[in-house]
Image (spheres, grey):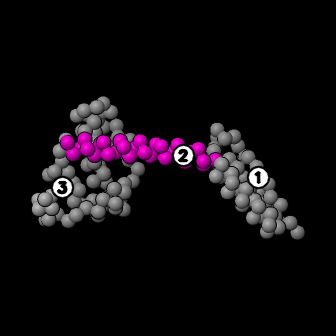
Amino acid sequence: GASEHADTSKPPIDWRVASRLPSVPVRVLAQGSSAEGAEQVDAFQVFCRWGASVDSESSEARKGLLAYLDSSWSEAEARRCLAVGAARARRLARLELVRHAYQRPLEQWLLLDQCMYLEEQGYAVQLRQFCETSVSPRNLLVLGERLS
């Protein structure tokens, strides 16, 4: 089986920790090409090498990753990783649609709940818009004045 051929000299990589990366610099994403084919795989390799070497809270978990990339990287594996990443990006885009659709109503509901709580505690409360939604989607302000 696959476990018979596993390299036991390298410690296993905890991918849940190792995959935590800081924000990716645009220069890393700009390397390579967005075209299909070898350029896309090359750009993905650049990103993976950056991710394996960047200092962050998960650096220790990624210690063996560069050696793995140098010894075991194949174009087929890179394409599989790209396919998984593309599928995750599509799923995330669908989830973001739902999140964006409910974000404003949920924020308004929470603010109204806060207003009701303050009124119950003896405050005169106003909910006001302090700027246009185009300036900031979080443009509501709760004003409370303690009643004597």
- Residue 131 visible to an observer of this rendering: yes
Task: Point out the stretch of residues depicted in magenta.
Answer: 76-104
Front residue (pair 49, 126): 126
Image disc number at residue 76: none
* Count of numbered marks: 3
Image disc number at residue 67: 3
- Residue 45 visible to an observer of this rendering: no
Per the model, the C-alpha gap separating discs 3 and 1 is: 57 Å
Residue 24 in percent (x, y) is at 38, 47
Front residue (pair 112, 140): 112
Image disc number at residue 127: 1
Q: Is the residue marked by circle 1 packed among few (<14), some (14-19), or many (20+) residues within 10 Å?
A: some
Quarter of the figure with residue 17: bottom left
Callout 3 secondary element: helix
Looking at numbered disc 1 in the image, what kind of residue is underneath it?
Leu
| 125 up-or-down from 98: above or below | below
